[in-house]
Amino acid sequence: MGFFQSLGVGRIVFSSDTSEEQYREYGKGRITMDSCFPVKALAGHMGELLHKDINLLFVPMIYSLPSFLKGHVVDTLSCTRVMMSVENIKAGFLRERKEFEERGIAFVSPFVPFAEPELLPKYLWESLKEHIPGLTLEETARAVKEGFRALEDFERKMREKSLEIIRWCVKNNRPAILVLARPYHMDPGIGHDIDGEFQQYGFPVLWYNYLPLDDWLLEWLFSKEIRAGIIRSYFDISDVWTSSYSSNTNEIIWGAKFSARLPWITGVIRLSSYECGMDQPTFTPVQKIVESSGTLFFKFGELDETKPAGSVKIRVETIVYYLEKYSQDIIKKKLSRLGAVPSQLLV
Amino acid sequence: METKEFHYRAYRPRPFTKEERSKTTILFGGLTWKHERLIQGSLERMGYKSMPLPNIERQDLDIGKEFIDVGACCPTTFTAGNLARTLMTLREREGEEGVKNNYLFVTIGACGPCRFGQYHESYERVLEGLNLTDFRLFLLDLLQMEQSAPGGGLEISMPLTFGLVYSMFYGDLITDMEYAIRPYEVVEGSTDNMVRESVELLYERLKNRPIKGKKIDSLIWHVFTGYFVDALKEVRRLWDEIEVDRLRVKPKVKITGEFWLQTHEGDGNYNIKRWLEKEGAEVIPPPVAVWMDYLINMELFKLEDAKGFVKKYYLKKLAIGTIAGLYKMVYNRLRKALNNIPNPLPDQRKLKELARPYFHYRLTGGEGHMLIGKALYAYLNRQAHMICELSPYGCLPNTMSVGAMAKVLGDYPDLLYAPIEIKGDAEVHAYSRCQMILTEAKRRAKEEFEEVLERTGLTVEDIRNFEEDHPELRRATYKVPHYGYAGTASNYAMHIAKLMGRI
């Protein structure tokens, strides 16, 4: 939004949340190869937007992502399928006829490397200049900065909210749940709204990618290990994960480490989509990182377009039983391993 | 709820020291037996004891599934299972301490977008599952010329890296010869025997190669020496003795796909190359060298994109361009020693341009845009009648580029394309899909040959008679030029017509 508004684009239209209807009506038949659910869902989103009053369809091929772990890990690449799915699904829309052209919609799919600051504006400008008359590279670079500013602002607010939730847990001696998933699982259609189910039972839910990053908190959680030479910084994950190329994977691993240390996170819920190749090698390490601290770990795997709502509810009920039974013990044990609770948490 | 320890730690191998070198065997795998035997020669020259893992078998898939997390791609499952089987066999033979102390496993990783950079995570599950976490497993970066593993026992130096590069080149070139000749051999089995003999000869040459220098002097020697070319000239003299009949009309099938699966020869891909040959096809196997060439050229393309932002741009471009040029030059010198029977490396810039409308070249992971580029290149330049693309079940990047081929096929409906998903345990399904396309490829090869006979006015008998007077034409190492036809028999007939003055 920040990027496009800065360019003076008047109207920005988003597709709706993922749903079975959206996929069935607009996406089916556009996928040219069996794939994970989030990739299949993209076809529904693209198809839905083609039916809206727009003249430019913008679907970026996101190669690398902004990450708070940059500088502490090898790279911040996005999942191969996320970056490549655009070309796959585009083929589904074009193999029989020129569908974008027929609808009078320009299809723009720039290569977007967030980790390459000079090339990011260049690639965006090259893909948009034909469609936004008079657009210059300088203007695009300014808009990219605006986009980053908007993103940082959003993230700051989300992290503040997470801290507020943790403080509430401390004050009320209540447990929280951390979700380890991929960002698209926040979409209730893809994540099956499982986080919402837990909230209905009164459990506050934190997401791994918006955890608070305040120095005083991380100092409390990680300083012993830094002093012992096990890790080099709060954000170092090399003690548990040695090939840190993938942005979301790295963040999931870091989130698991955070959850293992923060006393009030007593349960971790792992969500993973059908055929997620990025998640697959992480299943055992993530579970071990979490469980080695005594924190409860539960996994909802192979999420796909079918929604087994009944079985999800039953599992959530079971998990809630365990959380209620063991959370106070877990909080006490985890607290005993750390020093005095920082005053900033006792607000 | 007691826990053994507060923190989980990633696997870290015990150090491997220089003193242990003479009594420790390096296990490695992942390529064809030919490449692996040649790599063994290069390792032994540098003072390492080494042993390739046994060839992949169907049981490795089941063993792999037992140890690693669910949802793994087919190459990860096969290779993890293969490692597990090997370690179990060694443990049975030499006991737990024997396995831990007398062996270590070296694997390579790189890039990161695909699971290739994370295979070792699955191998670690194998060690946990076998209660062998003291066993040493080292991950090396594919793209580093010089590196070492903890302890200093394993050092990848410039001479070793070049030895490995030549092993890869030799393995590719012998494989290319093998697949170009076997379908036409007059004496059944003669090609396979020659492959074995050639690999042993080259293994000896690699094992006994001189070490000239350590850094830049080593580079210069390896690039310009005649040592490696001379070894291949010896190989050529051996292959001269094989007699071939190039009038067998066969469809030419180019193999593309995910790196491991397309290179592999064994149960991991249902032995599909051999199966295609049995079904009457000539196979064009994919060399490992193309992938390395792709990685080098990608650096060049990325640099060109960043022109204007890069300091000393022209100097850097010259440096990478020179590496890319030398790489190709060396490969071509080796090809020439085999009378250019092995195929040249494709022009990476052409592949990138061909794929551009369908797949952005910066989408890396696996083979990226190359699968589309190679399919189009083979089709447009009449290199093959059919493309057989091998996709592993659960592969991250390959499934996406296979999907993008839908638009290519919309634009080029005549392109015969067989994308085969390999699960490892469903060969009948894979074969039948492949056979459907192969039937059409056979028809085209036959029609093409008949067209050549009509165009030249030749009969098969005319050609046979001409061959009797020119027996050198039936040598395996005789080079038949490309006359714009995909089939070997068609180009051969055209060549005879030219020699006879008919065209």
Image (spheres, grey):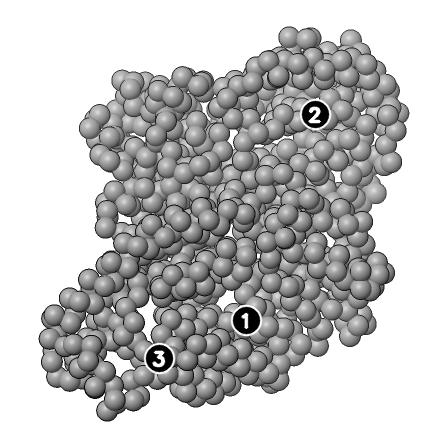
**Chain letter of the residue carrying label 1:** B
C-alpha distance separating marks 1 and 3: 23 Å
Residue at figure coordinates x 80%, y 37% from the top left: B7
For badge 2, the amino acid type reads Phe
C-alpha distance separating marks 2 and 3: 63 Å
Where is mark 3, residue-wise?
A: B244
Residue B1 percent across, percent down from the top left: 86, 25
Residue at figure coordinates x 55%, y 26% from the top left: A303
Where is mark 2, residue-wise?
A: A298
Disc 1 and disc 3 on one polypeptide chain: yes
For badge 1, the amino acid type reads Lys
Tag 2 secondary structure:
strand
Within 10 angstroms of label 3, few (less than 14), some, or many (20 or more) residues?
Answer: many
In the picture, residue B373 is in which quadrant?
A: bottom left
Residue B445 percent across, percent down from the top left: 25, 62
Tag 3 secondary structure:
loop
Within 10 angstroms of label 2, few (less than 14), some, or many (20 or more) residues?
Answer: some
Residue A168's disc is: none
Please name whichever residue, A243 or A346, is drawn nearer the observer in this view of the structure: A243
Residue A324 percent across, percent down from the top left: 78, 13
In what quadrant of the picture does the C terminus of chain B appear?
Answer: bottom left
- Please say if B222 is above or below A333: below
Disc 2 and disc 3 on one polypeptide chain: no
Closer to the camera: disc 2 or disc 1? 1
Please name whichever residue, A333 or B30, is drawn nearer the observer in this view of the structure: B30
Where is mark 1, residue-wise?
A: B34
Say whether residue A99 is visible.
yes
Please name whichever residue, B159 or B68, is drawn nearer the observer in this view of the structure: B68
C-alpha distance separating marks 2 and 1: 46 Å
For badge 3, the amino acid type reads Val
Residue at figure coordinates x 41%, y 87% from the top left: B241
Residue B436 in the figure: left or right of residue A149: left
